[in-house]
Image (cartoon, rainbow, N blue to C red):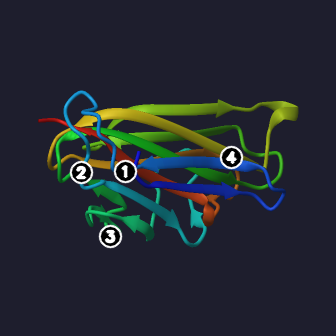
């Protein structure tokens, strides 16, 4: 199979929130050819991001730990496709607001500023929260020049996103299109 790279992100209570595996050096064609050399990235937000309640906002990923083809644009908080193919993206964040005021949390993946996938959690009454962890993933065929980003929406008092490993965006090419 080649080399296997594994990364897990855990909370202080040792619960695993996100686990991703990237396998390189395979011999299969994957329906259109392997993503060789490997195309992958992992970005995170180093500090909390203050949000405006009810406003969909691009997540400020300002640090990359892995970017094999230098395609993550930290200034634009987005990944720019340099090679046509099928990509797998994983994204997560921890939304925080004043106690018992959070009612809606949404995480969405955008391609060329168009929402392609979104997940939402709605909370009312006793289920209103002060912190909510959201995660999602998607596999998409993309073309050269496409830009991919993550946006968050939180309804609550003093909403923000947690920094560090609480807010992560990663992806890899599953197969190139030849």
Q: Residue at x 78, y 50 (%)?
A: 15
SS category of the residue bearing label 4: strand
Query: Do the residues under discs 1 and 4 have CB atoms within 8 angstroms?
Result: no
Residue with the mark numbered 2: 36
Q: Quadrant of residue 102?
A: top right
Q: Quadrant of residue 41?
A: bottom left
Count residues near mark 3 (Cα–Cα under 10 Å), then give few for <14, some for 14-19, many for 20+.
few
**Which of the two discs, 4 and 2, labels the residue nearer the N terminus?**
2
- Please tell me which of labels 2 and 3 falls first in the chain: 2
Query: How far is mark 1 from mark 3, CA to CA?
Result: 29 Å
| The disc label shown at residue 75, or none | 3
Residue furthest left in the image = 178
Between the C-alphas of marks 2 and 3, the distance is: 27 Å
Residue 149 position in % (x across, y down): 37, 50
Q: Secondary structure at mark 1?
A: loop
Question: Which is nearer the N-term, disc 1 or disc 3?
Answer: 1
The image shows residue 97 at horizontal and vertical percentages of 72, 54
Q: Earlier in the sequence, mark 4 or mark 3?
A: 3
């Amino acid at each position: 199979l080649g080399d296997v790279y594994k990364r897990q992100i855990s909370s202080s209570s040792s619960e695993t929130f996100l686990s991703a595996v990237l396998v390189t050096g395979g011999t299969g064609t994957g329906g259109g050819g392997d993503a060789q050399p490997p195309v992958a990235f992992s970005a995170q937000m180093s500090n909390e991001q203050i949000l405006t309640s009810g406003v969909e906002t691009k997540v400020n990923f300002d640090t990359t730990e892995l970017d094999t083809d230098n395609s993550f644009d930290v200034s634009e908080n987005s990944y720019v496709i340099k090679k046509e193919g099928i990509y797998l993206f994983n994204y997560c964040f921890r939304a925080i607001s004043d106690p018992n005021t959070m009612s809606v949390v949404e995480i969405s993946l955008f391609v060329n500023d168009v929402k392609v996938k979104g997940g939402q959690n709605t909370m009312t009454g006793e289920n209103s929260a002060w912190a909510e962890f959201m995660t999602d993933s998607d596999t998409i065929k993309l073309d050269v020049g496409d830009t991919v980003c993550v946006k968050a929406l939180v309804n609550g008092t003093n909403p923000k996103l947690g920094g560090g490993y609480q807010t992560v965006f990663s992806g890899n090419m599953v197969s190139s299109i030849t």
